[in-house]
Amino acid sequence: MDMIDRSEDADIQVARQAKIIDALVRRATRQNEVGTTAYSAFQSAIELQAQVAAKTRDLERAATELESVRFERERTRRNLDEALSAMGDGLALFTDKRLDICNDLFQHLLVDVSDRVVPGLGLVEYFDLLAQSEQVLSVDSRVTPHDILAPTLSLVIELTRDRWYRLNMERTSAGTRILLLTEITSLVRQNRVEKERLIDRQADYLQAVFANMTSGVCTFSSTGEVMMHNLQFRQLLGLPYAAVQKGMTLHRLLMLLTHRGLIADTSLEMVEKWQARLLRAGRFRRRVRSGTDRVFDLQANMLPDGGFLVELKDVTLEARATEMLENRVQERTAELTRTNQRLTEQYEEKARVEEELRLAKERAEAAVSSKTRFLAAASHDLLQPINAAKLLIATLQKNTAGTAHGQMTERLKGAFTSIEHLLHALLDISRLDSNDHDAVSPSTLHLGNILQGVFEDQMPLAEERRVTLRMVPCDCHVRSDPVYLLRSIQNLVVNAIQYTEPGGKVLFGCRRRGDKVEFQVWDTGIGIGEEDKTRIFEEFARAGNVPVGSGVGLGLSIVERTCRHLGHRLWVSSELGVGSVFRIEMARVETAGEPRSSAPSHPASDVPLEHIALVVENDEDVLFATTQTLQSWGASVLPAASTEEALRFVRDMGMPPDIMLVDYQLDGGDTGLHAIEAIRRETGINVPAIMITADRRESLLRAGESMDFTVMTKPVQLSRLRPLIEWKVQGQPGPVQPKVAHDMGLQGHTLS
């Protein structure tokens, strides 16, 4: 096995061979000393001689190769030096950011620092020398240490004696940086000549344009001296050639123009103002008139060097034409002024009449607004006694059934029902005509629930008038206001029953029309003539064939206002003596299988309620009437006038009531909301609650949704109150929750 690594340097190979030879010689000497025979000594000497000869040959061959490598290296170095010296550009190689080799041009370009440009010089130190050299006049950009260490760098260097060099630096893949200095003096000088030639040509071009301009142009220096002007400038001002010379001041030029009568003396006083305005705004424009009755358009603009350029245009003909036109306009204006004076007098008379009409209209609107505010504000006070009277009449009707006073009680009930309908109609019209944004509150409604309720409510009226009333069930959802849609459907059905003779028929239901739902009411009544089909929707308007005493004509007006507010389409088709069809078209809403209401759809049973009912009402008459009605149904009543009194009843009783019936407006700032919340908090039970109020605000309906109680408007319909109480008490009250399921599917809706 070869004991020498041939890839190592020749000097290292020779040293290792010398060590091996010494070891062999020592081994041979040791063997001679310990040899037992002359033959062994002779054999060892022979082997040692052969090995020494072989190693000697290897040593000679390695020395030869080493000498050859040294020769090739020196020759390569000389060739590289000669190549670098022969280059026309300065070249330097920096290895590990240190100067390794460079040619003479690179080293001696900067004579004052050339003695410091030697191998081992750092890259950053070289750029420092470049900045310190007195021969370097400028560098096109500032060099930072970050730029020096970048992969590439390019600089333009200006040297003394108008010499220019470009320095380019590139980094090789091995990390070596190559700096190349290329002289670009000839290119810079050529570009300079081209630039001067271009400037000269541009100046000639500008001079030609300047001389051939149609307007007169003169430029002034920043000190106000004439620099150059064109022929048109002198001709417009009527000055001879020698009058305007380069270097003439603006003041001398103006004095010359004044002396020749070309401008007025007062113009000199305005020049300073013009100059100040020019300095402030950068431009100035004015129309001036000369002493020779010529008109010039003068425009001045600031120049970059602080001077300014003045441009003159002769607009005498244009000015004269304008003056003639102005004179004609003045004449025409005078004529029009006289005509306008006559029209003004007529207009003032008309305005006076219109003002009187406006004041009359405002008084009428104020009266209507006052009526609307009065009806809205008085609704609670008006409905309270009617509600109490209805409750007392219901009790009286039950107690006088089958007696001589029974018929009188029925008539009394009918009279109060008429009063209730009229009051509801007036309140509805008042609210719909007001500017209240909460007048209508559209929401998604199940139309079938509303139709079913109307059918049940009006069936007694139909039976009384011996009219067959039928309803087609509907399972559609629509977008509408729950209160006013219910009122509109009720009015249409009631009208159909009232104006249908005994033995006639009334049918109502809905049809799907694409994305619309069309509610229809058909009857076989007296019909409506063509002349009355639009008039019947006005207040207090009735058809010509309507019998006397059949109403005051407000129901259809409410329907029309409701449909207009909600964007529903309303129309009627009818024939005298045959019947009528009223239609309301509404937008249909798609729902994901929403279940229908579980509210009772049948009258309340005659079984006694046998529930404990807490009634909170501040009006003594209403409280007495409500108590009598509930007791007549078999309920045990706790009558309270305030929340505190109601809490005392609950604490004395030691258990929650089965149902709460509360009014909204109580005394001393107390409300039904406080009462419901206090009773539930005291008992820890979500006691069922019904709020009976004359307040119809949307905020109260939203409170009903949030606090889980049902809102009924006054005067309350007993036919709905008792079924609602039975239905709400059927569920076992649980712990108080922020929200629970809607009662009867009507949470937040009013029931009338």
Image (cartoon, rainbow, N blue to C red):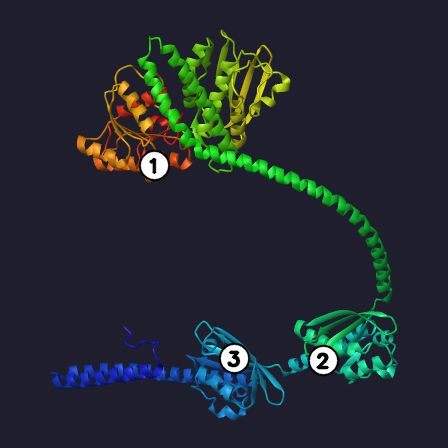
Crowd rating for badge 2 (residues with CA inside 10 Å; few <14, some 14–19, many 20+): few
**Quadrant of the rendered image containing residue 173:** bottom left
**Horizontal relation, residue 643 to residue 426: left or right:** left
Q: Quote the CA–CA distance across marks 3 and 1.
A: 74 Å
Mark with earlier residue (2, 1) = 2
Q: Quote the CA–CA distance across marks 2 and 1.
A: 88 Å
Badge 3 vs badge 1, beta-carbon distance below 8 Å? no
- Residue 79, can we see it? yes
Badge 2 vs badge 1, beta-carbon distance below 8 Å? no
- Disc 3 element: loop
Crowd rating for badge 3 (residues with CA inside 10 Å; few <14, some 14–19, many 20+): few
Which label sits on residue 142? Answer: 3
Q: Nearer the viewer, mark 2 or mark 1?
A: 1
Q: Residue at x 50, y 91 (%)?
A: 113
Mark with earlier residue (3, 1) = 3
Mark with earlier residue (2, 3) = 3
**Horizontal relation, residue 378 to residue 13: left or right:** right
Which label sits on residue 706? Answer: 1
Residue 695 position, x and y percent, is 40, 33
In the rendered image, the quadrant that contains the C terminus is top left
Q: Residue at x 45, y 22 (%)?
A: 419
In the displayed structure, 153 sits above or below 429; it is below
- Disc 2 element: helix
Which label sits on residue 196? Answer: 2
Q: Kindly identify the amino acid type of the residue bearing the numbered disc 1.
A: Ser
Residue 468 position, x and y percent, is 46, 10
Residue 440 position, x and y percent, is 47, 33
- Residue 512, can we see it? no
